[in-house]
Image (spheres, helix red, strand yellow):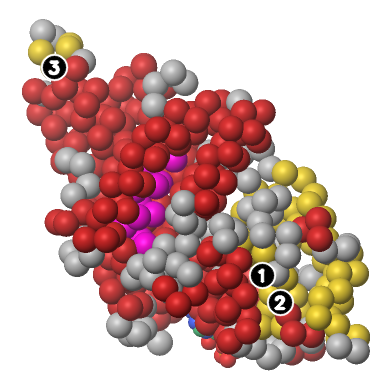
Amino acid sequence: MAMDPKKDYQGLSDECLKVMSEVEAFCEKEVKQTAIDADANPEVQDKKMMEVIAKACELGYNAFDVPKEHGGPGFTKLESVALLEKMSYYDAGFGITISANGLAAGPVLIGGNDAQKARIYEIIAHGGIGSFCLTEPAAGCDASAGQSVAYKDGDEYVINGGKCFITNGPLASYYVVFAMTDKSKGAGKGYSAFFIDKKIDEVPGMSIGRIENKMGIRNSQVSEVLFDNVRVPASALIGSEGQGFKLAMMTLDVARITCGITAIGICQRALDEATEYCKQRVQFGAPLSTNEVIQFKLADMAMKLQAGRQLCIHATDLYMQHVPFSTEAAMAKCVASDASAYISSEAVQIFGGYGFMRNYPVEKLMRDSKIFQIFEGTNEIQRMVIGRNIVK
Ligand code: CAA
């Protein structure tokens, strides 16, 4: 039961459906095999996969929701979500890399001034992808525990500190960085956000630390990003001093939807691979697909997939209608990522011993799925957000 864009996502424009077919053709040709090779061999990742990512950015796959007046196609959030599911179907690491603008540009689009917004759209419309620098060694789930600091010096800010687990750290065209400008006020009012509109090698004092060797989504580059007396103009401040934490939280609300839909891409791929396999695989004299035990597994997988997808769509609808959606975004991320962990594991189960082998497609999906229960707020944090909002 493949994704049906007209049925599963109601209201996509003809232009979006056309681009979706192009994305599909591109991913079949360029992403599908390269992603498997790159997952197995990081040296290939550095070369071939990076070329594919660059090509996708040239085609504008990083810029679906950039408005027309800023040089993008101006797709709605729902349309960009649907397109992201399609890209993630082929490789979740590719989807995360390409879609990171949603997370990285968020603070600027929510709290930035017109000049900052125009600049970020300019970078993205020219193929740039961003990096959201929030997490630190001591500040994972507890985003308020960050130790990075920034102080004002004349008409500049000076940033010091270190970020870890930063998606697109080594390859971003711009960075949004959170640092404490007033420790006495605590994170809620002491954090500030800065928009650094340059590549890392153009910013003195900014550097990449360790590049992580990950269990899954190995085609998404994740690294430390370090700040040693990094000077940025005062105009890099997003909003005003002390707004950083709220900007981060509001951005994460949106990003949790896109995180969820990327996990749904994995779910759909795992269901399709398992369905195809069980039609071919004969045991006890008949294809596995005729066995009710297997059919029930496929049914459970399909139900969880659709529940996760529809929650993502529902949260997107609320966002588009400017209705509070924080609770629903947390639900969507949590249900979709739990679904991808379950469905990819069941796909391995249906493949049996072959599923455990690296030359079959489903073990990668199982590895890729795990991080979705962890990043952009662990699923325990999502439950905390949902629970707090219920009792509020
Ligand atoms: N929107 C607006 N404001 C919000 C908000 C939201 N969604 N959530 C909290 N706030 C505000 C609160 O109203 C409060 O404001 P006041 O001080 O004015 O009352 C302030 O922020 C502090 O809020 P809390 O007291 O709720 O803060 P907390 O310290 O208890 O933490 C938390 C809340 C939800 C647990 C938060 O720390 C959190 O989300 N943690 C998870 C961090 C996370 O998701 N990290 C992911 C990093 S990015 C990543 O993983 C992506 C990647 O690489 C691909």
- For disc 2, the neighbor class at 10 Å (few under 14, some 14 to 19, many from 20) is many
Give the numbered dot on residue 194: 2
Q: Secondary structure at mark 1?
A: strand
Is 73 left, or right, of 187 in this rendering? left
- Residue at x-position 32% and y-position 36%: 270
Rounded to the nearest angstrom, the CA distance separating label 2 from label 1 is 6 Å
Residue 62 visible in image: yes
The three-letter code of the residue at mark 1 reads Val
User: Who's the residue at 26% across and 49% down the image?
Assistant: 305
The mark nearer the N terminus, 3 or 1, is 1
Category of crowding for the residue at label 1, using alpha-carbon neighbours closer than 10 angstroms: few (below 14), some (14–19), many (at least 20): many
User: Is residue 87 magenta-colored?
Assistant: yes
Q: In this rendering, would 113 be left or right of 210?
A: left
Residue identifier under label 1: 176
User: Does ligand 1 reach within 8 Å of label 1's beta carbon?
Assistant: no
- Going from the N terminus, do you reach mark 2 or mark 3 first? 2
User: What residue is drawn where x is 34% and y is 70%?
Assistant: 76
**Residue behind mark 3:** 287
Q: Main secondary structure of the magenta part?
A: helix
Cβ at disc 3 under 8 Å from ligand 1:
no
Tell me the magenta residue range.
Answer: 80-91
The C terminus sits in image quarter: bottom left
- The quarter of the displayed image where residue 105 is located: bottom right
Helix, strand or loop at disc 2? strand
Depth check: 386 or 264 in front? 264
Classify mark 3: helix, strand or loop. strand
Asked whether residue 248 appears in the rendered view, the answer is no
Q: Residue at x 37, y 62 (%)?
A: 80
Which corner quadrant of the figure contains ligand 1? bottom right
